[in-house]
Image (tube, rainbow, N blue to C red):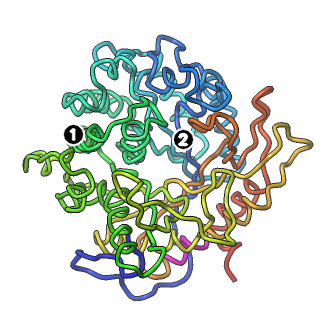
């Protein structure tokens, strides 16, 4: 989205303001992903993923860290479900490691891997916690990467077969599914800049990867409509784009940045077409797409998951290909350990923009959180994290602002339940509501976790007058 004056093509506009409260039945959850917390990536017959391979490549992850142990959730899932219950959360968003289900990505199913998630779902339900399953959170089986990975047009079929197996096993108990998590990150970090798995650097690969990811999403939705009985959606990371000035070059650069990061993944799914700016951005690298493929990508979904962390203040800069734009720092703003500006109003803006552009689709904030410094070892029974407390309070409030203006937001998932393996940052960045001592695997609830427990218990009333 470009701010101000976000584009709108939806026929209906925001409704009149509603009561300033979270609706009954609102989901208060926490989110994690498989490779970041599970550890034991090759246990019980599982196959390696692109992230296992990437993390074991020297120089790719800070400090040489890997996800081999992570939070040892594979052996401590029961303890972590108790943590969720102690916090009073009513939902838990987690991802399934594709390679645990199909070690080679396709072909032989691994019953032991599927049994792990079967036990996890049952444990959550016994604690009255709704499981929310993400089918793909970046960890493609390495055997499929050897066959071209997301560059291979067969990847949509691979994903559909994997989705079919998991849905058949768990849909009797799982009522909420998402296909992909943040496809933009896979294409941008994994295939354009090479900073994430699988570590490619190419201008020509990201458009192909994007399209195949979205084809895979559409194929999984078709599988779910045939087999599933509940709801399925997509999760995207959105970053509202604000021009650094009113100069025409900055405004145009902001529009390109918005098309690249935000509309590239929502327009095809919800409107059936790619933004026209992408052909300008990628030039000869942007391919033509068959109408039948766009139709398959745009199968109706039941809800949209929005991950929000920061905004992008954008300035034109020809030195930065392919956007010819860069994000600039705003002065006197708090920044997280990852360098992201703390800007709660951006969450309200982006939720309102989704509603204005794409209509009244139900929305969940599926990730929102911040990395701030916490000590490696907790002293006592609580970790004080005042910056994260302030961040959480402000962003839950920003979500309520969007609801009060008529946006149909039905849940909020904090990122993350646990300090974890933070991708190429290794264990140097902590996002958790719960502190993890990686040397001992001791879990300690942080002050932010205690606040979030109060928010969940009161359905947000503890934050409102």
**Residue holding disc 1:** 219
Closest to the observer: 227 or 289? 289
The number of discs equals: 2
Residue 63 pos. (x, y %): 68, 28
**Residue holding disc 2:** 125
Could you say whether the residue bearing mark 1 is in a helix, strand or loop?
Answer: helix
Q: Residue furthest front?
A: 319
Q: Which residue is at 60% across, 26% downward? A: 67
Earlier-in-chain disc, 2 versus 1: 2
Magenta residues span: 397-402
* Mark carried by residue 207: none
Picture layout, residue 411 above or below residue 11: above
Picture layout, residue 42 above or below residue 449: above
Q: Which residue is at 39% across, 28% downward? A: 140
Picture layout, residue 74 above or below residue 427: above
| The image quarter in which residue 385 lies | bottom right
């Amino acid at each position: 989205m470009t701010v101000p004056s976000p584009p709108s093509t939806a026929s209906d506009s925001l409704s009149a303001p509603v009561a300033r409260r979270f609706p009954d039945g609102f989901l208060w959850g926490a989110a994690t992903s498989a490779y970041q917390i599970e550890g034991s990536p090759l246990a019980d017959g599982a196959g390696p993923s692109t992230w296992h391979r990437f993390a074991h490549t020297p120089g790719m992850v800070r400090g040489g860290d890997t996800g081999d142990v992570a939070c040892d959730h594979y052996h401590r899932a029961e303890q972590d479900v108790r943590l969720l219950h102690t916090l009073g959360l009513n939902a838990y968003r987690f991802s399934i490691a594709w390679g645990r289900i199909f070690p080679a990505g396709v072909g032989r199913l691994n019953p032991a891997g599927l049994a792990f998630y079967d036990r996890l779902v049952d444990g959550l339900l016994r604690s009255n916690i709704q499981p929310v399953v993400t089918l793909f959170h970046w960890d493609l089986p390495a055997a499929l990467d050897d066959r071209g990975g997301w560059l291979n047009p067969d990847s949509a079929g691979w994903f559909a077969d994997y989705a079919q197996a998991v849905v058949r096993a768990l849909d009797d108990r799982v009522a909420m599914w998402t296909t992909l998590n943040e496809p933009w990150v896979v294409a941008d970090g994994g295939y354009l800049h090479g900073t994430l798995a699988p570590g490619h650097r190419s201008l020509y690969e990201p458009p192909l990867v994007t399209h195949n990811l979205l084809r895979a999403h559409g194929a999984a939705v078709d599988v779910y409509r045939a087999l599933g009985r509940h709801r399925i959606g997509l999760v995207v990371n959105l970053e509202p784009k604000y021009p650094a000035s009113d100069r025409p070059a900055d405004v145009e650069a902001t529009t390109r940045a918005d098309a690249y990061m935000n509309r590239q993944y929502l327009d095809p799914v919800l409107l059936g077409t790619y933004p026209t700016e992408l052909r300008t951005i990628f030039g000869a690298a942007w391919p033509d797409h068959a109408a039948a493929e766009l139709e398959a990508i745009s199968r109706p979904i039941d809800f949209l998951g929005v991950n929000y962390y920061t905004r992008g203040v954008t300035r034109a800069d020809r030195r930065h290909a392919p956007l010819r734009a860069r994000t600039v720092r705003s002065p006197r703003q708090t920044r997280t350990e990852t360098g992201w500006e703390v800007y709660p109003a951006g969450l309200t803006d982006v939720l309102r923009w989704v509603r204005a552009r794409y209509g009244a689709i139900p929305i969940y904030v599926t990730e929102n959180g911040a990395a701030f410094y916490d000590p490696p070892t907790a002293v006592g029974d609580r970790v004080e994290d005042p910056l994260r407390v302030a961040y959480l309070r402000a962003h839950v409030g920003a979500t309520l602002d969007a609801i009060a203006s008529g946006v149909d937001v039905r849940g909020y998932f904090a990122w993350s339940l646990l300090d974890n393996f933070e991708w190429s940052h290794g264990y140097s960045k902590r996002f958790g509501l719960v502190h993890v001592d990686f040397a001992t695997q001791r879990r300690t609830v942080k002050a932010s976790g205690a606040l979030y427990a109060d928010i969940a218990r009161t359905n947000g009333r503890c934050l409102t007058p």
